[in-house]
Image (cartoon, rainbow, N blue to C red):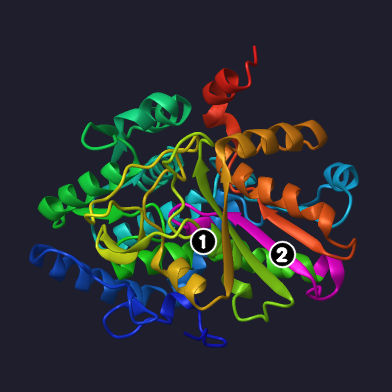
Amino acid sequence: MKIKKKIPLIDQHDKNGFWGGKFGGNYIPETLKKPIEDLEILFGKLRRDRKFIIDRDKYFKNWVGSPTRFIKLENLTKNLGGAQIWAKVVSDANGGAHKIYNATVHCLIAKKAGKKFIVGDTGAGYAGKMLSMAAKKFGLRCKIFMGAKDIKRQKPNCDAMKKNGAEIVPVYSGSQTLVDAVSECMRYWVSNCDTTHMCVGSTVGPNIFVKICGWSTAQISKELKLQLKEKFKKIPKKIKLINCVGGGSSAYGFWSEFIDYKKSQIELIGVEAGGPKKSKLHAAPLSKGASLGILHGAASYVCQTKEGQINETESISAGLDYPGVSPMHCFLKDSKRARYTFASDEEALSAYQLVTKYEKLNPSLEPCHAFAEAIKIAPRLSKNSIIIVNSCGDAKKDRDILKNRLKKT
C-alpha cells in the first residue's frame, strides 16, 4: 500500500470507495443508495464551486474563528527537557473543538440540498453541540442522537445543545455510548432522507461521509502549515504530529497537509483510548490488534468478539469511546505512514494535571491522550526535535469527570 503524492487522502480510494482495497466502502441498505449517490454528486460539485468555497472560508474566518493559535509550551518543555513541545490550540474555535468545521460544512451542504432538517450523532457532545450551533446559525431544525451514558457524563454540552434549540434523542440500546448513537442516527435517516440531511460526526461511515468530514477538518493542517513557515521560515526537519484518535476526524485534519512528506521529516502519531489500566476493555482497535470488520457502513479495524460481534469499549473520554476507526487511519497504519499507540485513562488524567499545572491550557480528556504520549517521549528526544500536539477540545465538558476523578472542589 502506497500513499499517492499531491493527492488528498480523502480521494485515494478506488471506484468502490475503498482505501487500500479493503478499508471503507459503502455497506448500506438499498433504501440509502439513492440518497448517498445524490450526496456524492452534490458534494463533488460543491467542493469545486468557487462561490461555495468562498462561503465556507468566510464562515471559517468570521464565525469559527480561523486561524486558531499555534504556540510553544515553554514551561512544559522546560520541565520535561528534550524536545520542544508546541500546541495547535484548535479548542480556540467557536464552541471549543474541531467539530465545528464539519458541522459548518454539513449545514452549508444541507442548505444547498434544500433540506430543512439536519440530524447527527455525538459521544463527547462536541459534535452535537457544534451541529446545534451551526443549525441555529443557518436556520435548520436539528436532532441529535446521543447514548444515555454519555448524556449523563457530558451534561455541559447537552445543556448547550438544548439552549441552541436542538432535540436530544437518548439512546438506551447496547452500551448506550457513541457506537449506539451512530446506529440510531443512521436508522432515522433511512426513514427521513427526503427532508433531512445527516451529518456523521467523524471520518467514519459510508465513503461520502468520510470525505466530507476529512475535507472540512483539513482546515487545521492548512493553517498549521502556514504557521510553521511563519515561525521557522520553512517546514522543520524533525517534527512529530501527535493527535488523539477515536473516529479520527481531528487527526486526519491535523495531518492532511503533511501526509505526503517523508516520515523521517514528519512523523504522524495517533493515540487511542487504552481504557482503565485494570480493565480488559478499551477503544484502541489500531494499537491493540483488532481485526477487520464492518461497522456503520464501512470496513475498518473494529473491536469485536471472537464471534465477530461488536465489543463493548471503555474509556474515560466519551469522544474516543468508539469500537471502530476511520478507514483512512486503517490505510495509514497498514501503509506504515502513521504510528498508532494508546494511553490509559490514568495516563490521560496525569497528562491533564501536568499540562494545566505548567500552561494556560485546559485540554479535554480526548487530547490529553495525545499529551500523555508527548510527555512520555519528549525527554528522550533532542532539543531540535519538535512535538506538536493538537489540543482539539477544551475541558469544560469534562468538569464533572475531572472533579470526581481528581477530587477537585
The magenta span reads 230-250
Residue 287: give x, y in percent of width and height. 50, 58
Looking at this view, is 62 or 27 the one in front?
27
Based on the displayed image, in which of its 4 quarters is residue 321 positioned?
top left
Can residue 235 be found in the magenta stretch? yes
Left or right: 319 as drawn, with respect to 81:
left
The quadrant of the rendering that contains the C terminus is top right
Q: Residue at x 64, y 45 (%)?
A: 92
Residue 112: give x, y in percent of width and height. 30, 63
> What count of labels does the image hold?
2
Based on the displayed image, in which of its 4 quarters is residue 226 positioned?
bottom right
Can residue 197 be found in the magenta stretch? no
Q: Residue at x 87, y 55 (%)?
A: 82
Q: Secondary structure at mark 1?
A: helix
Residue 362: give x, y in percent of width and height. 67, 35
> Mark 1 — residue?
217
Lower sequence index among marks 2 and 1: 1
